[in-house]
Image (tube, helix red, strand yellow):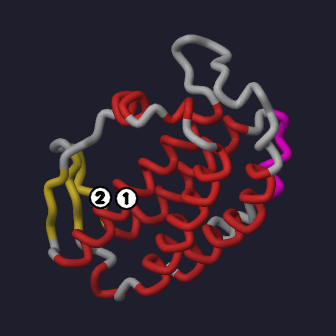
């Protein structure tokens, strides 16, 4: 899991400045389509994802099998009003939360990696998979935020090399 944790740290270090540079972009809250999230809402979703995954990681480390509720991501984004939140604060929170998750991933005991989770009855998924998949999910949404492709160079893919 050290490689997964390192990839997450490298993504944070490379992408956080890119996100910070968008602070003056007036289109951050604009949706390209009424059914799609704005860049602010995507970043808010990534913060929500970090929060939910921290719960999964910690709880999965505590017990060999876990049943976990899903979360209604659109409702989380709307209720927290991410479209109107302070961008710099969001970027700071995203980076800090993900640094903590990278630390958590780097310190997981190998004997816990095969602990499993079912999410709303779907699964089981191992802790190893959930941790690795978290980073892939993060990269997916970061690509959405930077459709010009410049964020892709920030992904080192050390896990998949």
| Mark toward the viewer: 2 or 1 | 1
Q: Secondary structure at mark 1?
A: helix
Q: Image quadrant of residue 37?
A: top right
The residue that appears at 56% across and 20% down in the rendered structure is 36
Q: Position of residue 119 (x, y in %)?
A: 23, 48
Decide if residue 113 is on the left or right side of residue 18.
Answer: left
Q: Secondary structure at mark 2?
A: strand
Look at mark 1 in the image and give the residue it sits on: 53
For the C terminus, the quadrant is: bottom right
The residue that appears at 42% across and 48% down in the rendered structure is 48
Instruction: Please say whether residue 29 is one of the residues in the magenta stretch.
Output: no
Q: Earlier in the sequence, mark 2 or mark 1?
A: 1
Decide if residue 25 is on the left or right side of residue 135.
Answer: right
Decide if residue 119 is on the left or right side of residue 26.
Answer: left
Nearest the eye: 68 or 37: 37
Q: Which residues are magenta?
A: 148-154
Q: Position of residue 60 (x, y in %)?
A: 24, 70
Q: Position of residue 118 (x, y in %)?
A: 20, 53
Look at mark 2 in the image and give the residue it sits on: 125
Q: Position of residue 150 (x, y in %)?
A: 85, 46
Q: Which mark is residue 89?
A: none
The residue that appears at 60% across and 53% down in the rendered structure is 89
- Within 10 Å of the Cα at label 2, are there few (<14), some (14-19), or many (20+) other Cα atoms? some
Image position of 39 with respect to 11: above or below: above
Nearest the eye: 6 or 28: 28
- Within 10 Å of the Cα at label 1, are there few (<14), some (14-19), or many (20+) other Cα atoms? some
The residue that appears at 67% across and 51% down in the rendered structure is 88
């Amino acid at each position: 899991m050290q490689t997964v944790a390192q990839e997450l740290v490298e993504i944070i270090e490379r992408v956080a400045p890119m996100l910070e540079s968008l602070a003056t972009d007036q289109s951050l809250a604009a949706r390209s389509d009424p059914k799609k999230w704005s860049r602010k809402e995507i970043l808010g979703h990534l913060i929500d994802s970090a929060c939910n995954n921290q719960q999964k990681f910690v709880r999965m480390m505590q017990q060999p099998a876990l049943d976990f509720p899903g979360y209604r991501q659109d409702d989380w984004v709307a209720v927290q009003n991410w479209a109107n939140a302070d961008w710099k604060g969001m970027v700071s929170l995203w980076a800090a939360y993900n640094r903590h998750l990278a630390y958590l991933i780097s310190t997981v005991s190998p004997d816990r990696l095969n602990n499993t989770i079912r999410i709303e009855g779907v699964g089981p998924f191992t802790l190893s998979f959930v941790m690795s998949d978290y980073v892939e999910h993060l990269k997916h949404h970061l690509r959405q935020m930077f459709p010009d492709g410049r964020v892709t160079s920030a992904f080192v893919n050390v896990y998949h090399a």
